[in-house]
């Protein structure tokens, strides 16, 4: 079933790859400085080789901070490998720095939080998804696809130790990046506290929880918190939440795939919120 919601604003078409750009990355100090200054293309992250030094790195750090683009130090061998994976096997002079182009623009965190507050004040019940260190880009893409179909108002992901809006995510999301508002935050636990302050209930999935997900009353402004594929929601994040719920398991496998669990919970929320609506069937 197709959504009737209008897509998010599109960006102008990207330039064709040049000698300092492959299909999803930019390399070299000057091109990255100019990309940050122009702020036309969304950047997922910037990686600088450990031990690399250039007086312009300070400007890159400053501009990246202004644009909310994470900067990481990595082994030079990783940058060399990325050049080959990116498709340019001849240009290896990356100057110790590579920027990854994001598949979509991230939303401004404060603006997104303010929009949730405005909806609550208007009597609406926004639905938020918070993802705590989801590392598999296909899982992230699948969750975003379901979030769009379920009418989720906002998705928050961490800047570090998590998948970002890469091309793999965009492919798995099947167009959802055009509609879903996604913001990055530096600290998920702090985000939970801020959501609570703004009147949003925060509920984490936890296999040890006493309450089944179907028993919780989701007809309130709520944020569903889902954790890492292996470890689930981190303890500190879980303890900050208002409540925890579990998805009962009847088989021999210990857990569900996180994207499947996300879909089950989101559609239970949708079921509870729409079950009282009048429907006519023929």
Image (cartoon, rainbow, N blue to C red):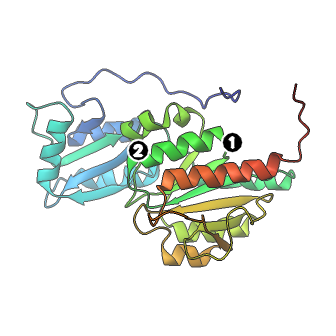
| Side (left or right) of 56 relative to 280 | left
Q: How far across and down, in percent of the image, does residue 128 sit?
A: 65, 54
Residue tagged 1:
151
Residue 275 coordinates in the image, percent (x, y) = 84, 47
Give residue 32's position: percent from left, percent from top: 29, 40
Which residue position is annotated with label 2?
138
Circle 2 SS class:
helix
First of labels 2, 1 by sequence position: 2
Compared with residue 77, is residue 33 higher up or lower down, i.e. above or below? above
Q: Which mark is residue 126?
A: none
Quadrant housing the C terminus: top right
Secondary structure, mark 1, is: loop
Q: How many residues crowd around disc 1 within 10 Å: few (fewer than 14), some, or many (20 or more)?
A: some
At 69% from the left and 30% from the top, the residue drawn is 5
Q: Residue at x 65, y 67 (%)?
A: 203
- The answer to whether residue 104 is left or right of residue 101 is right
Residue 184, relative to residue 282: is it above or below? below
Report which quarter residue 274 is drawn in: top right
Q: Is residue 129 visible?
A: yes
> Which of 221 and 46 lies nearest the eye of the viewer?
221
Give the vertical position of 125 relative to 232 (above or below): above
Rounded to the nearest angstrom, the CA distance separating label 2 from label 1 is: 20 Å
Answer whether labels 2 and 1 touch (C-beta < 8 Å). no
Percent of width and height locating residue 77: 11, 52
């Amino acid at each position: 079933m197709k959504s009737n919601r209008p897509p998010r604003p599109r960006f102008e078409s990207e330039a064709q790859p040049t000698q300092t750009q492959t299909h999803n990355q930019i390399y070299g100090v000057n091109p990255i400085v100019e990309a940050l200054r122009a702020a036309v293309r969304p950047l997922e992250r910037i990686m600088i080789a450990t031990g690399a030094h250039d007086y312009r790195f300070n400007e890159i750090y400053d501009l990246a901070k202004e644009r909310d683009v994470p900067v990481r130090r990595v082994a030079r061998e990783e940058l060399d490998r990325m050049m080959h994976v990116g498709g340019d096997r001849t240009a290896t002079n990356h100057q110790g720095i590579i920027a990854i182009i994001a598949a979509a623009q991230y939303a401004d965190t404060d603006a997104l939080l303010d929009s949730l507050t405005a909806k609550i004040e208007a009597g609406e019940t926004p639905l938020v998804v918070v993802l705590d260190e989801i590392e598999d880009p296909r899982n992230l893409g699948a969750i975003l696809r379901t979030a769009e179909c379920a009418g989720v108002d906002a998705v928050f992901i961490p800047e570090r130790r998590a998948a970002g809006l890469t091309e793999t995510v965009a492919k798995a999301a099947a167009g959802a990046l055009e509609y879903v508002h996604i913001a990055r935050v530096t600290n998920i636990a702090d985000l939970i506290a801020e959501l609570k302050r703004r009147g949003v209930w925060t509920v984490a999935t936890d296999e040890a929880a006493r309450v089944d997900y179907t028993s919780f009353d989701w007809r309130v402004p709520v944020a569903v918190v889902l954790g890492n594929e292996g470890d689930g929601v981190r303890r500190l994040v879980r303890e900050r939440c208002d409540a925890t719920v579990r998805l009962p398991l009847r088989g021999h496998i210990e857990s569900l795939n996180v994207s499947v669990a996300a879909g089950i919970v989101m559609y239970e929320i949708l079921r509870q919120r729409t079950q009282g609506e009048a429907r006519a069937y023929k």
